[in-house]
Image (spheres, rainbow, N blue to C red):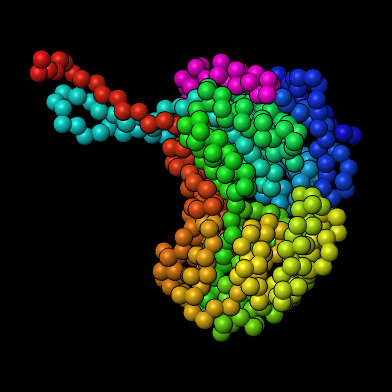
Amino acid sequence: MTITRGLLIGGEEVSAQGGRTVDDVNPFTGGTMATVAASSPADVTNAVDEASKAFPSWSVSAPSERRRIFLKAADLMESKAESLVSTLTSETGGTFGWGMFNAGFAVSILREAAAATTGPLGQVLATDTPRTLSLSLRQPSGVVAAFAPWNAPFILGIRSIAIAIAMGNTVVMKPSEQAPLSSGLLLADIFGEAGLPAGVCNVVTNAPSDAGEIAEVLISDPRVAKVSFTGSTKIGRIIGVLAAQNLKPAVLELGGKNSLIVLDDADLDYAVSAVAFATYMNSGQICMCADRIIVHKDVAGEFLRRLGEKANSLTYGDPKDPHTVVGPLISSQAAERVATLVEEAVSSGSKLVAGGGKAQGAVYAPTVLAGVASDQRIATEEIFGPVCTVDVVGNEKEAIELANSTRYGLTAGILTENIGRGFEIAKELRTGIVHVNDQSVDDEAQAPFGGVGDSGYGRFGGQAGVEAFTTTRWVTMQMGHKQFPF
């Protein structure tokens, strides 16, 4: 049975103006699983109207009340996890395990946001002025425009709005066109059931062809104070320009060309497992996935042999099959793009160690490539599929230089049994995140998450998230009268 959903504006589910809709397609079967409203610019303005109306009361609501709502939302999401994951699997092609991880992590984000509602929101400043109290205060900013992606829809959808709402802001959320239910509507439903007041969280879905216009209308609205975007670097540049043109602060969490460095003292069994997880989790469709494996020459041969065997052993295909490790990509077009990158590399002399071949609809085999030239597209572009390239280096310096040779700078991993050695290398990597003796795919709700360079700017998570979605104000209180010179 096909699901039908409207826009969520002011606490009501409404049709888009003109009754326009768009199909939400299952990437594995190609069938329509839902029909959702396709908003117009006027719908977006209506959503901002409602968010703006809700802001004055929500911004001064009791922190304990906000905490209660967030804790209830977390409990609801936890209790509904299996039914929510069923939708995620159909909508994105993710496996059941990936979906459950999404739900569990989203719950932790909600609970971290609940804790933040009663945390410190400023400090007392030193001052040279006698009998004056000088304060730095963090206060809600206003309406936040939130853009959520499809690839980790529960995690990144909740992250795009949770701390903003917890801090007293209201939001207009634009979920991904490829996962409007999982990355937006279902999450807003949870908040509504938890008691979030009408107008605090509004959701506008849209047709893919209208995405640019919808984003421009939303960001350009003078009542929107801040922008939250998670997605590709290509679209992030557009969002960043729109935000800058309208003098709106933005948090941009974009793509990555992430490296895993395997040093000569690494435990190879552990390294192979870590690399496989970082490369093939969610079919490589995570911004933190490892595209480039950089291996010391002394262990490269054995490592490559074991990694090839590991990749060839992984079950891929139907996400509903409990044995499937690597499900389909988000679309057949995405799978064809990955296949083309691999074919170009092989035709230019790269060695296919595992996988490869043609895309099968939206499915692509877990793949390992070696001997990739630095000027090939697969060496410079974010792959965003179940493929990694393996480069061999002679020493630590070469490993660091190669890891830093990209314009991206999101995350990295260093696999070594010597933690001190790994930490010294970590300090030289130009990434927002790095994990010593671990792989690149990791996140915690209380940790500052974000990158540098083409991976974006700003941080989600913990105190960094609080600072991103509040405005700092300097307030002084003079105890008595000052003496003025005239």
Q: Residue at x 67, y 47 (%)?
A: 152
The answer to which of 330 and 117 lies nearer the viewer is 330
Q: Is 19 or 80 nearer to us in this picture?
A: 19
- Is 266 on the left or on the right of 283, as rendered? left
Main SS, magenta residues:
helix
Task: Inspect the magenta stretch and tell me whether residue 347 lies in it.
Answer: no
- Quadrant housing residue 103: top right
User: Residue at coordinates 12% horizontally, 17% vertically from top-left?
Assistant: 484
Image quadrant of residue 182? top right
Q: Which residues are magenta?
A: 41-69
Picture quarter with the C terminus: top left
Seen at 72% across and 48% down, the residue is 99
Percent across and percent down for residue 422 are: 46, 70
Residue 200 vertical position relative to residue 78 in the rendered view, above or below: above
Residue 446 in view: no
Q: Quadrant of residue 79?
A: top right
Q: Residue at x 31, y 34 (%)?
A: 123
**Residue 199's spot in the image, x, y percent?**
61, 20
The vertical placement of 10 against 299, above or below, is above
Q: Is residue 79 above or below residue 102?
A: above
